[in-house]
Amino acid sequence: MIPSILTSYTDRLSYEPGDPVRLFASNPSSADASVELVRIDAALDSPGKEGQTTPVDWDGPRGFRIDGQDGTFGSFMTADFIGRSTSYDALTLGALVRLSSAARPGFQAIVSVGDDEDHLTLGLLDGAVTVMRATAAGETRASASTPLHPHHWYLVAGTAGTGAGLGVHAIGLDALIPDESAEQDADVEPLTLRSAVVAGTFPATTERAGEVVRGTAASTFTGKIGWPFVAHGVVGDETLRRMASSERPLDQLGGGRLVGAWNVAQPGRGALENVTAIGGVGAGLLANLPTPGVTGHAWNGEIHHFWEAPTQYAAIHFHDTDVVDAGWAQSIEGTLPRDLPSGVYGLKVSVGDETDTVPFCVCPPRTSPANKVVVVLPTFTYLAYANEALFEGMDGEVTGGAPVHPNESDLAHVGNRTFGLSQYDKHSDGDGVVFSSASRPIVNMRHDYSMWLSESGRGFSAEMYLIEWLTSIDVPFDVITDHELHAWGSGFLSSYEVVMTGAHPEYYSGAMLDSLEQYRDEGGRIMYLGGNGFYWVTGVVSDQPLVVEIRRGHGAINAWTSEPGETGLVSTREHGGLWRHRGRAPQKLVGIGMTAQGWGGSQPYHRSEASRSPEVAWIFEGVDEEPLGAYGRVMGGAAGDELDRADATLGTPPDAVLLASSRDHSNYYQRVPEEVAFILDGQHGGQVDPEVRSDIVYFRTPSGGEVFAAGSIAYSGALLENGGHNGIARMTENVLRRFAGLPRPDGDTDDQHPSIEGEQ
């Protein structure tokens, strides 16, 4: 599925100076392309500099030949038989299966054995159990007459034998579900078992891509598969029924009939690549990252995580829309200059009048940070939203009072599996997407991307408001991403006076929370300039390529909810969902946390009485506007999109100073569901609910740390108003320079301000 637009990706989202950078690019037609390394300087809607970039010298190629590139998608498993030369005149293929959607047209393979030219396959044809024998001379098959019912477990089996023909069985594990069987007379030749494919059929190829496996297979399957097996001979109906009623169905085969099987109940990191083999077959190799850690046919509802009772989780959910690595051919490779300053850069690919600038972060060398300030780009959040298609079927009049306007790149990825899905999307069977990979084109991770809902920067493009503003006030800064925060930790952060977040640091690993908390408690200073931060429990599946995992759980603003019993992350063996429900509400870290969301315009802030205290007067020096932030590039104000508020019951420190709050949000803004006990008409919109607001807070820690938290995704969109000469920008700059020990905006030194210790 070649993309209909010029698009590209790099092998990583962040590099250090001197690192090689690999580019993968695709264009609908063959053409000559030029490429240059650029520094990304400006936001998409900055007057006179819209999306401005500056070329940077490097030793990479200046051009290349570009063609259309298809992707690798659809998860499956492969394995080789030990010896690979035994011939069988009769075989039974089987598995436990569960579909999550109604029958779909076409063929989906469940278990296939043999090789490209000669194989036996058990699968579904238009939803009905089918066994198919394929040779160079053609194919024969037997099919049941009725499709499987979705949301029910079945033991399915296909038999083939010389003199016995072909047969299929579908035994429902629910007493209310009727069984199905069918037979077909056929001349069945003996089959040599060389390889096996589960959730797909031949031809199937795999290759390692960093820490993951990608590949392609024919007729991939969408649904859960448990205990796939290959048995010698034609297994009878009575034995199959015993298998269907057993927690460990393979124990019922007996008589040495098992040729090979795979125990998909193995939990943990290895379950993301290798599946333990049973019998005369090699370990299964999982391609394109299907979803393990899901309930199997024996799940009894008393266990909630796969590591507590692995046998009850003896299943893997395969999807024809799974993507772990697009698998494109490399277009170019170049090396970043060793003296390249930390910042936001990109490779700008041009074909005629069309351009695509794929962004990345250049971090400071890990051993020698250069500046006092570091900005953390929330790349885990970018991956969560990567290529989301929430605009499909959305009524903009309901969400924000106006139609939504997806752009060309938004529309280009819809229905094209090469792009993969976001963690806000559902797979083709309605199952929620739990994994997201950076190794694919991500159209909404561009500096000039205008988000269809707010018609402004969001995600990465919203970060450019902050980056452009920092550059304009001549405050030197380094840039890292979530990945460095996760991997390098608080020891790296300790080199900085100030850590600044992006506009939407929603997805956080436990290691990231630990790092920020330790940094703060050891005297570090945090500026949280966003909303909906530190919200979802996030695991890292792979560093190369970067792949993250979530499990939505059952109590939050959700595009989908986890299936019962499926809230455990396989990457970390921890309970997923909200950090709040794990006792780590954002208020404990930065004083504020998610309270509401909406898109019916943004509002300004109104200062509190506490903000006029002499102890915090330095925050407002030079700020003479009231209200604050009645302007901004994100829906016209500084408080909008997703909002955070202070709440002592959730962990806001008792000495935190509430500096300002927004109010008068429209009823398009609604409280988060985890805070609403009863749904009552007219009680929860911004016009009637006082908790629908954004708070700005400031507090100190006993060790000398400080936190300034703004509580709105729209906040950074106000920094550049009037050329950066406005109250939001001045307040933010006051805090930044004070935290960093830099001269104040008026040129005075911070020596005129007492130290924290002195104030105490």
Image (cartoon, rainbow, N blue to C red):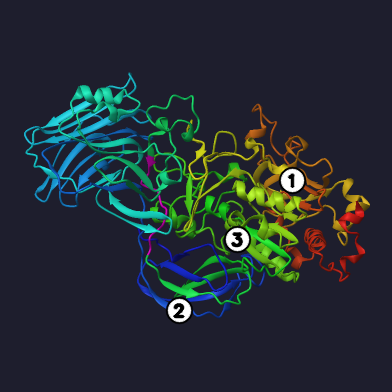
Return the mark for residue 61: 2
Q: CA distance from mark 1 to mark 2?
A: 48 Å
Return the mark for residue 461: 3
User: Which residue in the protein does label 1 denote?
Assistant: 694
Say which amino acid is labelled 2.
Answer: Pro
Q: Secondary structure at mark 1?
A: loop
Q: Secondary structure at mark 3?
A: helix
Q: Which residues are magenta?
A: 317-328
Residue 136, placed above or below residue 446: above
Magenta portion: prevailing SS class: loop
The answer to whether one can see residue 416 in this image is no
Say which amino acid is labelled 3.
Answer: Ser
Residue 141 pos. (x, y %): 15, 38
Mark closer to the chain start, 1 or 3: 3
Q: Nearer the viewer, residue 704 or 697?
A: 704
Say which amino acid is labelled 1.
Answer: Ser
